[in-house]
Image: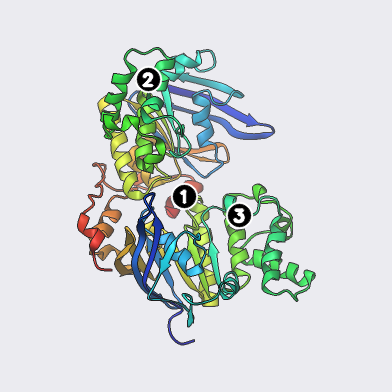
Amino acid sequence: MITVENLTVRFSGSTAVDTVSFTVAQGESFGLVGESGSGKSTILRTMVGLNRHWSGRIIINGMDARTTRQRDLARTAQMVFQDPYGSLHPRYTIGQQIAEPMLINGIADPVGRTAELLDLIGLGAKFQFRFPHELSGGQRQRVAIARALSLSPRILLLDEPTSALDVSIQAEILNLLNRLRRELGLTFVIVSHDLAVISYMCERLMVMRNAREVETLTREQLRASDVRDDYSRQLLAAS
Amino acid sequence: MTGPLVEIENLRVAFRNDDGSWNDAVRGVSFSLGREKLGIVGESGSGKSLTGRSLLGVLPDYARISADRLRFDGIDLTTASPKLRRSLRGGRMGMILQDPKYSLNPVMNVGKQIIEAIRIGDRKLSGAEARRQAVTSLEAVQIRDPERVMGLYPHELSGGMGQRVMIAMMVVREPDLLIADEPTSALDVTVRTQVLSIMDELVTRRGMGLIFISHDLNLVSKFCDRVIVMYAGRIVETLDAKNLHAAQHPYTRGLLACLPSIDGSLEPLPTLTRDASWLEAAS
């Protein structure tokens, strides 16, 4: 479903991602773990076309990210950001935010589909006339997820989807994401600094440090503390 | 010193609603603190930060604060003059905030900021001596090459380093009480451990009282002696940190249960079902 080969991203002199490769199978959930500045978010942003200067190869559902039109990529892979306070337009109603990608892409019946999506994420269609400031953090993150799902993508790229939320709300969002993955057959790439979240959500994970891959583990290896690298061990001990 | 460092009885903080009525954000909180590490845990909006801020006296003017008793080291804070309270802040009470990116002055280098904090405390101190103290304080929080860091601006610091600078700045005045409001939630796990151990060492060595405000129950239980759990402006449970897992209140138990763990079950996580009776539970 996703192939990333020798991805390197440079920002004026510093290297944010250094020859990183991984693949994610259809329906799989893949985690990226590491400290801030290790390049994990940059990988996600590059995959959806938010960085222009990169080298290597990114194939998403058979499409080369370099040559495919942004619009076609957007219909396959969508991103959910960390901060639900920053990622919603403050002066658009919830309904408008969710319908916007559908209007851009000329999808039929955006209004009806918005109501469907709001039901799907457990808020209900009555929320479509509210503004973001009337919603709690957890509700906003649900809206961001509904918006990401509005183009019926096959892949969700989740950048720290719960780290701005309370632990009680985190549980609700993680459960929601797992349900959606099962019901809609989605593929996930999840970035998090929280190994417990990754272990709960992902079948495989890659530990990153200083822009490079440290090692790639399966959930079973993580759970058995079967790690080869000292840094992963350190990370495991700190969590 | 005799008697507790901090005594709070029936603290209430309220804000006005749009229609002019008062909405209680903190509803009758009482606790006392000795020279120990006390954790306050709760979700956002539970009133934990407001409680810490009422002690310091840094709530906005439009908040209505009342308490039967609000004492710091024998000083009655409810009747203390603004001047006295100002002299307590920084000198005898310090506060560490969540995000060093927003709480340090972006256009002043680190050294100047720490020296400023020192010289407000002791205006007779010479510049050279203040500088020496600032460097020592950075060494105390295990910053390598403090001379270089003194000349850096906040945007040149990493999160962990910024947080350590904040701690240095607060601890250099040797306050009796340190209020840390989510001091590590903006930090990576590996850095978090480091920052916590620095705080732990400073608090223990200098015999400070610490109020550690956090939403992370597990972290707090590892780090503190006692934990207060707040829900909707009230204390629902007070626990010895080591007995956290024997918590009785359904809210505390719910908070513990909803955390995923590395080797935990893959079944859907239990979520909190909030009971209206929790709002009225005795504090």
Q: What residue type is labelled 2?
A: Leu
Which residue is found at the position 62% from the left and 62% from the top? B142
Q: Nearer the viewer, mark 3 or mark 1?
A: 3
> Residue B217 location, x and y as percent?
36, 58
Callout 3 amino acid? Gly
Which subunit holds the residue at mark 2?
A
The amino acid at mark 1 is: Leu
Nearer mark to the viewer, of 2 and 3: 2
- Mark 1 or mark 2, earlier in chain: 2
Q: Where is residue A63 in the image (x, y as percent from the top left)?
A: 46, 14
- The label on residue B162 is 3
> Disc count in the image?
3
Is the residue at mark 2 from the same chain as the one at mark 3? no
Q: Residues within 10 Å of mark 2 (few under 14, many from 20)?
A: many
The residue that label 1 is drawn on is A235
**Residue B272 spot, x, y in % from top left:** 25, 50
Q: Residues within 10 Å of mark 1 (few under 14, many from 20)?
A: some
